[in-house]
Image (spheres, rainbow, N blue to C red):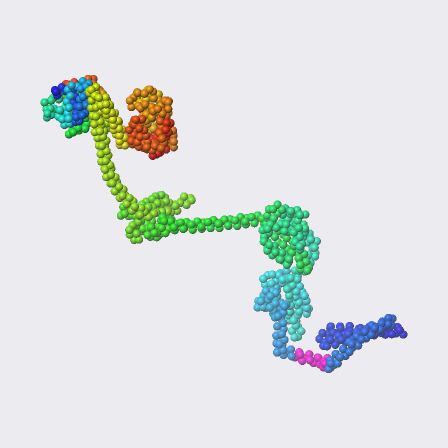
């Protein structure tokens, strides 16, 4: 009995389960069947009923009533819903037409198709569909002539509708598939449908495209096949991918090999490094190590910052990281620092390898050494800067020259080789009164009113200094400008020279000129003054000559008229002594002696005064003189003065000097006579040799030898002569009086003299352009120094003496 | 005094100088016949046998003329010039004896043919010595031009 239950329940379950399967098949095959939701609910309801029966079989062995109850509950819910849905549908099911009725309807429809209005309506719908379709839709006749061509077809094949309609489909066939169309049309003619036919077609532009086409026959109302409709889509992309995939799958092995080869090639060519997302170097190739000078071990595990040269700003790297973090390829030029500190430039491409999550897994950097290019660029930049600098310098210089030209007071004019003025500075315009004019060079003088210094003759055109300079001559000229602007006339002094380029080719000429009108006036004034002066000089000279004559007459009369009475006094007093002496009183005799002595002194005085006057008047007669012989001669003349005395003469080798023999002899005579005179207390032998020699004073030191020295030294290129004695000397505070006329430092009782000797010496020395001075010390002797100036004849003989004597 | 047998013609305007010179000459007993002309004109008249001296003959010139330069009327140099430029008188020895030591006068004197130039020393002893030497030389030592040579 149990098995009866089991089998019965099993069969019921199977039966129930069969019904939904049949129902689903029915629905799938007849999609136009309405109410398919109620079919679904009905199927579910039957499935649930079947399941309750299956639970009955289960409960025989397992008694799972809870599960059975749940299944029954679900069945109950489904059955209630199905019933509830079925009830409102009942009227609509009743209204569904029966088979007969449908046939009737079909017939009516066929009639209506015949009716044009409806046809038009349908065609409109269809046309809209065709027009907007994403597929190319083409219809053609059985012989392949195109009858319709939608916009997509135009896009796909490139031909417009007007270009395609009426043409043969063969125009789309590639040559190797020429037979394909006929084949397709044959199949269509047999009523077959060609679906998803993959083939190749040629576009209007000649490009080949892969298409997938479905071609269906078009039948007329009678069912006869009249043409074909073709629906095609571009299959190129897909096709290619498929082909590539196929190929790649087929050649995976080869590809891997190739990849390895490519990597090798890349390593040979490029500097390659791989870093992880943290920027840590995980791989470097050999070239990387070579250029950076770091070993692989030094680089792996390090950051790229190890190579930072500091050249690029932070922002540069920030931008780079932003790019690659976001999966973008970064490209740029980086300046790196190698291990030894040298820098190098690399052209860098960093490719982020992006994982499945779209985030970079690692970065591959491929670099090329562009250091040389960078250096070349650097040189170029440098050269450009240099160029800019020199250009700026040139501009500065030009500006400077311009301001010089503008501010100079000299007129400056430059003409090119064609005689066109290219510079005419403001001063030139001011002086000439006119600016640069475009006149032929031959007419310059006429245009600017240039005259010869005679102020009336026009300056000869070919003589114009600027024109001559253009012909290569350096010249200068003084000329007068007189034109409409310069009615008064302006004197200019000009100098012109040719301008040549560095190849010495004439490029024109420059003339510079000054307004010398004022100078001219001044010169005239000076000339006039000079003339006047000359006249005055003549007058003055005449006056001087007159005075001189008077002076001469005076000295003549002095020599003649003063000496005569002296002589008379002397003569007659002498005669008195001689003729009446014995009868005279001794006192009278003494007085007569005094008269004689006075006469003698005065005679000396007159002689020396005349001598002094003569020195002033006489012209200097310079000749090379051997001073040693002069000194020797003078010593001989003075011999009587040194009679009975021990005098040591120390005479140096004196040079030959250009001087006046007579006058220089006088100098030595006066100086040596002085020396002898003032050394008298030294070398005096027992007195009384001459009446005029005073006896040595008691305080004079014991007699020593007289030493008189004549020497010279070179001082400032000219000889300084010295006459020194070891006589009584003088007090230096009276040194100024030594050379004055009638100035004496000693009483006449001590040393005779007129006080004219040294004045004469000074006058002679000064006449020679020389200088005389003295040094002395009381009781220690005196030294007289003098120079004789430099005569022209003496220059070669006086040990390279400089020109011009000291005064 | 026989003017035609004259030893010395002294041309001197100054009485003192004249006396001193005569004194010196006579003291040395060198010249007995001395004529003194007191100015240039008189000296010329004497030598050229004119006016007061018209009776004189050119054939008997003085043996020596002592000529001062500074003279009234005709200057000493002018006198010299006329004497030396006339063939009848140019051989007469002329010694200029003057106070002047002017180079100018010396040069002019020699240029005009003076036979000697003496500056009168201020010192009388020297003066006497000088006069003595001159007289000795020209009147005793020197051989005058033979008489017949005169006036050629």
Q: Within the image, what quadrant is residue A243 found in? A: bottom right
Residue A326 location in percent, x, y?
64, 59
Q: Can I make out residue A550 in this image?
A: yes
**Which sits in the foreground, A762 or A25?**
A762
Q: Quick one: quadrant of the C terminus of chain A? A: top left
Q: Nearer the viewer, residue A447 or A48?
A: A447
Tell me residue A346's x, y (percent). 60, 50
Residue A187 x, y percent position in the rendering: 67, 67
Identify which residue is drawn at 58% across, 68% down.
A161
Toward the right, the furthest residue is A1
Q: Decide which of A259, A768 is in the foreground and name it.
A: A768
Is residue A705 part of the magenta span, yes or no? no
**Residue A624 x, y percent position in the rendering:** 32, 28
Q: Which residue occupies the foreground of this view, B92 or B138? A: B138
Vertical placement of residue A265 versus A48, above or below: above
Q: Based on the picture, tell me whether residue A100 belongs to the magenta stretch.
A: yes
Q: Quadrant of the N terminus of chain A?
A: bottom right
Residue sitting at x 35%, y 45%: A495
Q: Is residue A644 left or right of residue B139?
A: right
Residue displayed at 64% across by 65% down: A233
Location of residue A725 by image quarter: top left
For the magenta stretch, what is the residue range?
A92-111
Against A128, residue A548 (above or below) is above
Whether residue A696 is situated above or below residue A140 in the rendered picture? above
């Amino acid at each position: 009995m149990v098995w009866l239950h089991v089998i019965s329940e099993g069969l019921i379950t199977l039966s129930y389960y069969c019904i939904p399967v049949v129902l689903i098949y029915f629905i799938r095959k007849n999609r136009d069947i309405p109410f398919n939701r109620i079919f679904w609910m009905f199927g579910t309801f039957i499935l649930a009923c079947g399941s309750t029966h299956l639970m009955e079989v289960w409960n025989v062995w397992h008694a799972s009533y809870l599960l059975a109850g749940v299944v029954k509950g679900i069945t109950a819910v489904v059955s209630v819903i199905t019933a509830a849905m079925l009830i409102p549908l009942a009227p609509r099911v009743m209204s569904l037409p029966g088979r007969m009725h449908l046939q009737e309807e079909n017939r009516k429809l066929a009639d209506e198709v015949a009716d044009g209005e409806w046809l038009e309506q349908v065609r409109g719908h269809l046309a809209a569909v065709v027009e907007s379709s994403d597929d190319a839709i083409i219809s053609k006749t059985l012989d392949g002539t195109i009858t319709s061509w939608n916009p997509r077809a135009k896009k796909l094949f490139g031909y417009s509708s007007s270009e395609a309609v009426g043409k043969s489909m063969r125009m789309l066939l590639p040559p190797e598939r020429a037979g394909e169309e006929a084949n397709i049309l044959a199949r269509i003619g047999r009523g077959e449908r060609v679906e998803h036919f993959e083939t190749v077609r040629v576009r209007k532009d000649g490009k080949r495209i892969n298409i997938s086409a479905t071609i269906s026959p078009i039948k007329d109302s009678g069912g006869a096949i009249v043409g074909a409709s073709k629906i095609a889509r571009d299959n190129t992309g897909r096709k290619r991918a498929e082909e590539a995939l196929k190929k790649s799958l087929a050649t995976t092995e080869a590809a891997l090999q190739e990849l390895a080869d490519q990597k090798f090639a890349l390593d040979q060519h490029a500097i390659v490094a791989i870093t992880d997302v943290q920027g840590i170097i995980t791989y470097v190739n050999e070239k990387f190590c070579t250029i950076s000078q770091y070993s692989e071990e030094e680089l792996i595990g390090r950051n790229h910052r190890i190579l930072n040269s500091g050249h690029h700003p932070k922002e540069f790297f920030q931008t780079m990281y932003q790019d690659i973090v976001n999966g973008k390829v970064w490209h740029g030029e980086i300046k790196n620092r190698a291990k030894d500190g040298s820098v190098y430039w690399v052209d860098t491409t960093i490719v982020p390898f992006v994982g499945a999550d779209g985030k970079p897994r690692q970065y591959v950097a491929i670099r090329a050494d562009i250091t040389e290019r960078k250096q070349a660029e650097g040189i170029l930049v440098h050269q450009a800067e240099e160029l800019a600098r020199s250009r700026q310098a040139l501009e500065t210089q030009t500006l400077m020259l311009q301001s010089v030209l503008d501010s100079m007071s000299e007129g400056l004019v430059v003409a090119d080789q064609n005689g066109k003025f290219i510079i005419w500075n403001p001063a030139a315009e001011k002086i000439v009164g006119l600016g640069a004019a475009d006149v032929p060079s031959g007419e310059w003088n006429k245009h600017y009113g240039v005259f010869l210094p005679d102020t009336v003759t026009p300056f000869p055109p070919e003589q114009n200094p600027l024109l001559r300079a253009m012909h290569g001559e350096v010249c200068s000229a003084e000329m007068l400008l007189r034109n409409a602007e310069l009615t008064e006339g302006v004197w200019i002094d000009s100098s012109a020279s040719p301008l040549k380029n560095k190849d010495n080719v004439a490029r024109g000429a420059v003339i510079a000129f000054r307004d010398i009108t004022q100078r001219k006036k001044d010169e005239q004034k000076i000339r006039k003054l000079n003339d006047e002066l000359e006249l005055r000089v003549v007058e003055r000279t005449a006056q001087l000559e007159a005075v001189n004559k008077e002076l001469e007459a005076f000295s003549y009369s002095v020599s003649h008229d003063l000496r005569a009475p002296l002589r008379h006094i002397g003569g007659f007093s002498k005669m008195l002594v001689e003729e009446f002496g014995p009868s005279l009183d001794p006192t009278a005799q003494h007085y007569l002696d005094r008269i004689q002595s006075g006469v003698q002194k005065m005679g000396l005085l007159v002689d020396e005064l005349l001598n002094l006057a003569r020195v002033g008047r006489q012209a200097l007669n310079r000749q090379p003189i051997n001073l040693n012989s002069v000194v020797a001669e003078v010593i001989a003349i003075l011999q009587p003065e040194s009679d009975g005395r021990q005098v040591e003469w120390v005479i140096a080798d004196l040079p030959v000097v250009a001087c006046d023999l007579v006058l220089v002899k006088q100098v030595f005579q006066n100086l040596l006579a002085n020396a002898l005179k003032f050394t008298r207390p030294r070398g005096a032998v027992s007195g009384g040799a001459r009446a005029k020699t005073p006896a040595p004073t008691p305080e004079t030191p014991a007699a020593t030898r007289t030493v008189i020295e004549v020497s010279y030294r070179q001082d400032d290129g000219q000889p300084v002569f010295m006459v020194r004695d070891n006589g009584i000397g003088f007090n230096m505070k009276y040194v100024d009086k030594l050379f004055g006329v009638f100035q004496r430092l000693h009483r006449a009782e001590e040393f005779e003299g007129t006080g004219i000797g040294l004045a004469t010496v000074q006058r002679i020395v000064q006449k020679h352009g020389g200088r005389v001075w003295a040094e002395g010390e009381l009781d220690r002797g005196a030294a007289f120094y003098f120079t004789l100036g430099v005569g022209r004849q003496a220059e070669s003989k006086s040990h390279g003496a400089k020109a011009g004597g000291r005064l | 005094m026989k003017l035609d047998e004259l030893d010395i013609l002294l041309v001197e305007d100054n009485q003192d100088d004249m006396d001193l010179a005569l004194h010196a000459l006579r003291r040395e007993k060198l010249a007995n016949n001395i004529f003194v002309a007191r100015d240039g004109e008189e000296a010329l008249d004497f030598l050229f046998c004119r006016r007061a001296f018209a009776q004189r003959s050119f054939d008997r010139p003085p043996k020596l003329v002592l000529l001062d330069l500074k003279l009234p009327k005709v200057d000493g140099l002018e006198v010299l010039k006329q004497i030396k430029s006339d063939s009848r008188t140019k051989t007469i020895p002329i010694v200029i004896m003057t106070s002047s030591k002017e180079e100018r006068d010396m040069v002019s004197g020699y240029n005009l043919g003076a036979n000697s130039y003496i500056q009168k020393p201020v010192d009388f002893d020297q003066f006497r010595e000088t006069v003595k030497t001159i007289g000795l030389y020209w009147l005793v030592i020197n051989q005058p031009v033979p008489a017949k040579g005169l006036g050629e």
